[in-house]
Image: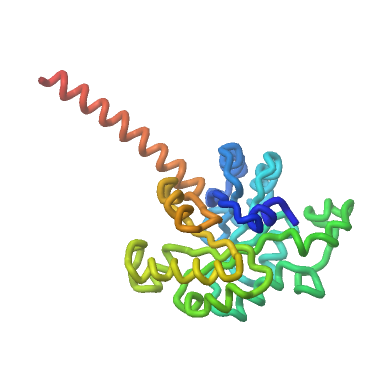
């Protein structure tokens, strides 16, 4: 079991961020910041699979687990990023228990799943470490997203599927599907969070969510979320930049006002 899976099993609260810029240097900067995990977003991010390796190398260099949100639940998409060395996979927009079960199969080698078997890839040291096949099924972190009404209606069944490490709520998608776009304070959205947390509590599964900032992340942690994303490489950069610009602009305005008076 990888350190990340063990920490999840130990019920630790872990903080990470999404990587959407497709940049190895951005990944390294986030790794150096001290996050518990990083996640390359191939669903909404800028870079594709061809930009994954530089980010993987940067995360590995600083011993930070790198997960990947694949753009679809197709078997080949999960297999590709795992062969490159990803520590886990996040599957977006799943709607049913059967879809979640099938997605999990893509993370395991036969007979437990249908992941393609090869040893000349990076995950097996380009053929030097074929023994990696023996432990791979126990090491990959599985993250199933709950971001629509259909998945929410089946959450009790989904939570009982063996092998799920994290049930991850996508606030934007879920709030839109519930008819309250972007309104995470709406009673129907808050009730959805409670339902997912209650279902996961029955099975000891971690629940994750994406928070826009650190303050919101702390509130989610206090509520019982244990796998919390804080923005992304892009939003962290723009927010810090905007804060700096707003600060110096206000200081300049005050200086002008003082001279005018």
Q: Is residue 103 left or right of residue 17?
A: right
| Residue 182 percent location from the top left of the image | 35, 62
Res. 7 visible in picture: yes
Q: Is residue 193 left or right of residue 97?
A: left
| Residue 146 percent location from the top left of the image | 51, 69
Question: From this viewpoint, which residue is outermost toward the left?
Answer: 261
| Colour pattern | rainbow
- Vertical side of 256 occupied by 34: above or below: below
Is the N terminus in the top left, top right, bottom left or bottom right quadrant?
Answer: bottom right
Q: Is residue 185 left or right of residue 122?
A: left
Q: At 85% across and 59% down in the image, what residue appears?
A: 119
- Vertical side of 168 occupied by 240: above or below: above
Is the C terminus in the top left, top right, bottom left or bottom right quadrant?
Answer: top left
| Residue 92 percent location from the top left of the image | 55, 67
Q: At 36% across and 62% down in the image, what residue appears?
A: 184
| Residue 162 percent location from the top left of the image | 67, 72
Question: From this viewpoint, which residue is outermost toward the front?
Answer: 202
Closest to the observer, 120 or 261: 261
Q: At 60% across and 52% down in the image, what residue appears?
A: 12
Q: Is residue 257 left or right of residue 4?
A: left
- Vertical side of 242 occupied by 13: above or below: below
Closest to the observer, 154 or 25: 154
Residue 80 sits in quarter: bottom right
């Amino acid at each position: 079991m990888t350190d990340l899976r063990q920490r999840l099993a130990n019920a630790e609260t872990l903080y990470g961020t999404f990587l959407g810029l497709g940049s190895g240097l951005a990944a390294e900067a986030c790794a150096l910041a001290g996050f518990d995990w990083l996640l390359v977003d191939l669903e909404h991010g800028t870079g594709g699979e061809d930009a994954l390796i530089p980010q993987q190398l940067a995360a590995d260099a600083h011993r930070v687990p790198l997960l990947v949100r694949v753009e679809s639940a197709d078997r080949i998409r999960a297999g590709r990023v795992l062969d490159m060395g990803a520590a886990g996979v996040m599957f977006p927009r799943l709607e049913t228990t059967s879809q979640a079960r099938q997605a999990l199969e893509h993370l395991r080698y036969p007979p437990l799943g249908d992941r393609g078997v090869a040893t000349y890839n990076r995950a097996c040291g380009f053929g030097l470490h074929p023994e990696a096949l023996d432990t791979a099924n126990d090491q990959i972190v599985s993250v199933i997203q709950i971001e629509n009404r259909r998945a929410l209606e089946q959450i009790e069944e989904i939570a009982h599927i063996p092998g799920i490490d994290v049930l991850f709520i996508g606030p934007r998608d879920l709030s839109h599907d519930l008819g309250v776009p972007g309104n995470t304070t709406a009673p129907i959205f808050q009730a959805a969070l409670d339902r997912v947390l209650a279902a996961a509590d029955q099975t000891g599964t971690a629940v994750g969510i994406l928070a826009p900032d650190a303050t919101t992340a702390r509130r989610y942690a206090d509520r019982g979320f244990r796998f919390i994303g804080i923005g992304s490489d892009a939003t962290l950069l723009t927010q810090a930049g905007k804060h700096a610009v707003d600060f110096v602009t206000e200081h300049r305005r005050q200086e002008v006002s003082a001279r005018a008076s």
